[in-house]
Image (cartoon, rainbow, N blue to C red):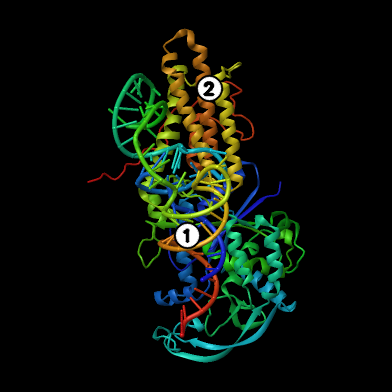
Amino acid sequence: MKPFFITTAIDYTNGAPHIGHAYEKVLADVLARYQRLRGREVFFLTGVDQHGQKVQQSAEKAGVAPAEFVAGITEKFRALWTKLDISYDGWAATTDAAHKAAVQTLLQRLFDEGQLYKAAQKGFYSVRQEQFLTEKERGPDGTFGAEWGEVVELEEENYYFRLAEHRDWLLAYIDAHPGFITPDFRRAELRNAVEKLSGDLCVSRPKSRLAWGIEFPFDPEFVTYVWFDALVNYISFAPGFDPQSKAQNPEFAALWPALHVIGKDIMVPAHGVYWPIMLRAIGFSDEEMPALLVHGWWNISGEKMSKSVGNVVDPAALADQFGPAAVRYYLVADIATGQDADFSPERLIQRYNVDLANGFGNLLNRTLNMAQRYRGGALAPVAAPSEDVQTLRAENFNDAAVYREKFDAFKVHQALEAFAAIVTRANVFVDTSAPWKLAKDPTAAARLDEVLVALVESVHLAATLLLPILPDKAHAALAQLQLAPAPLDAPAVLTASHQLGAPEPLFPRLETPAAS
RNA sequence: GCCAGAGUAGCUCAGCGGUAGAGCAGGGGACUCAUAAGCCCUUGGUCGGGGGUUCGAUUCCCUCCUCUGGCACCA
């Protein structure tokens, strides 16, 4: 099977990570781990976008060199991904020498092939804000507001990428490839944007204005525009990528194309317009276009999260307070992939307590405890199980199928519903079969055996399904069971005599802040 | 302004042509293996407003309102 190549957006190293950054990485990590669980080879790429004007400015303000400034923020991101157990295989930092070389090689090639051209732009330029102003910025009286400071009219040369000539191709591509974007309601939004596409893309910035970037190989007076730098990370950090030639070497060809996990804010125009057109210009065919998985945002009490509102949630503090497992679980369980959701610590605690502590964790604990108490933890395969045990197995297996189907469609929250269904079914089975009664009845020994086996099989499957979401906790559960992960495409049936481990609470309940 | 998403029980959401569902929260009960967890029963809704199509609409169509996002515009 082709390896699974998944990427996230690379985060801008201008400020500390927030809950939105964490969500995207956890989502991608969960998808990556699911593919690994299914036996597929995975390459998971994430990283940081370190160039640009804002970084340059923040560094100046902090009184340090951009490289030093960026290193500090980068470390915060890496520490967070370690804390949240993000299993990335590749780290894309755009100041990396290999990346810079790849960007430069691609620019040179596109220039040589006539995809880049130099042209003059004339317009109004704000010295203070260091940017060209458009009619948008002009006030009702025709002048530019005081916030722009001194505004001068100037003419500037820059390099442009021939974007517009690929417009019709992109429209046709979008129409012919519904899998390009998930969820599919985003397709209309993208199509709308592409139809309005006019003009080429300015891909250079004069060094006099911006020094912190990748220098143009054929013109050292310019550095590279952010997206022509950042987007390239998806290929420049992919093993085996060769920027020199259109014909890619086998290592890269085996891996590509990628699934790009991105937020809705950067779909248009960067990932939905610039990126496919850049790839096409570089020489990628229609069959080599990546797919986009566009996720929504976490709002805070119905409001957009923003620094100015002061409602930014720090994921590192959250993980310290509630544990990484609670954070990971909440971030994928309480949002429908593609939609927005409302963040609340109360819900985080609730989902953890209900699903993990009271649900799965307690089921694991009571199952092991009964097995140890009644049978010393030793179980034997059941030759001819009763009807209710057979039904339990069949329904569990059916839930495993639902889980796979939902995961394959990136609907992690619904896959988790299948997990929860298995847990609930087993908890109900404990009550209907009442092992504590069977244990007091010597004639019910065989029944007690099959009940305990059925429960262990259920917990075994549930623990396996939890592996992509909470790898640590799921492995700990499997360790208590003394079992390797269960197969997902066959019923989880105990086939040999087995000795279980000792029960130990895996998910201690989180205390709800007491109402005063 | 254009395009899209959302508006369903207190909360988070599912359903999308046959006169409303889940989880959580709330109420009651029986049990005891377990992290006072689990199990059973149960109270909650004129499905944003108004029209229309249909034997019948939460579900299809039109329109309006509110929220969200993108794009455009800003006289």
| Residue A164 or residue A4, whichever sits in front | A164
Secondary structure type for disc 1: helix
**Which amino acid lies under the numbered mark 2 shown in the image of this protein?**
Val
A59 up-or-down from A418: above or below = below
Secondary structure type for disc 2: helix
- The disc at residue A372 is none
**Which amino acid lies under the numbered mark 1 shown in the image of this protein?**
Phe
A65 up-or-down from A79: above or below = below
From the image, tell me which residue sits under label 2.
Answer: A453
- The disc at residue A77 is 1
For image coordinates 42% across by 88% down, the residue present is A141
| Residue A355 or residue A73, whichever sits in front | A355
Give the x, y percent position of residue B24.
38, 39
Q: How far apart are the alpha carbons under marks 2 and 1?
A: 44 Å
| Residue A82 or residue A386, whichever sits in front | A386
Q: Are marks 2 and 1 on the same chain?
A: yes
Q: Earlier in the sequence, mark 2 or mark 1?
A: 1
